[in-house]
Image (spheres, grey):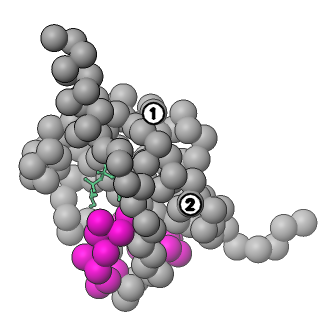
Amino acid sequence: MNTQPTKRILTYGTFDVLHFGHMRLLTRARKLGDKLLVGLSSDSFNAMKGKQADWSYERRREALLATRLVDFVFPETHWEQKPGDIARLNIDTFVMGDDWQGKFDDLSAHCDVVYLSRTPGISSTLLRNAMRAAVV
Ligand code: C2G
């Protein structure tokens, strides 16, 4: 019988036009524990981040769950929700790509904080622009 406690990993993002860079982040994050939970940026929060996702919240959520790497997806609606999420969801480790290096160190008061290398050469913006160009 497995007596090890379940290690719960948390990350956040827009995850628009889900791509290889996101998959590598999610795969490495998932390997840090037993459950991976994702705070998925709502459309209104994306606007606050200055982002306009091509895919709706529901499509982005569906794509994340289809990877089978993610156990639970919930809305990210404001910057300040992370400490409450960590407590409410009983999180052991918070993970972000290292384009955010240092930005969330304050969360180390609540759980482990891990930054993973960002995958170069691919982004939702690149893919969005390529798709829009192809449509023309
Ligand atoms: N990512 C990556 N490699 C890429 C692109 C993205 O590793 N080529 C990672 C980012 O570092 C991030 C995650 O994938 O950890 C999600 O990226 P975005 O959807 O761009 O999320 P972002 O806008 O950075 O939102 O409160 C935190 C924010 O919601 C993060």
At x 67%, y 68%, the residue is 6
The circle drawn on residue 28 is: 2
Residue 130 lies, with reference to residue 91, above or below; the image says above
Please check the rendered image and state whether residue 86 is part of the magenta-colored stretch, yes or no: yes
Q: Quadrant of ligand 1?
A: bottom left
Which image quarter is the C terminus in?
top left
Q: Position of residue 42 (x, y in %)?
A: 23, 44
Q: Position of residue 36 (x, y in %)?
A: 54, 57
Q: Which residues are magenta?
A: 85-107
The residue that label 1 is drawn on is 63
User: Relative to the observer, which residue lies in front, 100 or 127?
Assistant: 127
Q: Residues within 10 Å of mark 1 (few under 14, many from 20)?
A: some
Q: Amino acid at mark 1?
A: Ala
**Left or right of 42 on screen, residue 121:** right
At x 43%, y 66%, the residue is 117
Residue 81 lies, with reference to residue 103, above or below; the image says above
Q: Residues within 10 Å of mark 2 (few under 14, many from 20)?
A: some
Please check the rendered image and state whether residue 88 is part of the magenta-colored stretch, yes or no: yes
Q: Nearer the viewer, mark 1 or mark 2?
A: 2
At x 37%, y 88%, the residue is 109
Residue lying at the far top in this picture: please name it. 136
Q: Amino acid at mark 2?
A: Arg
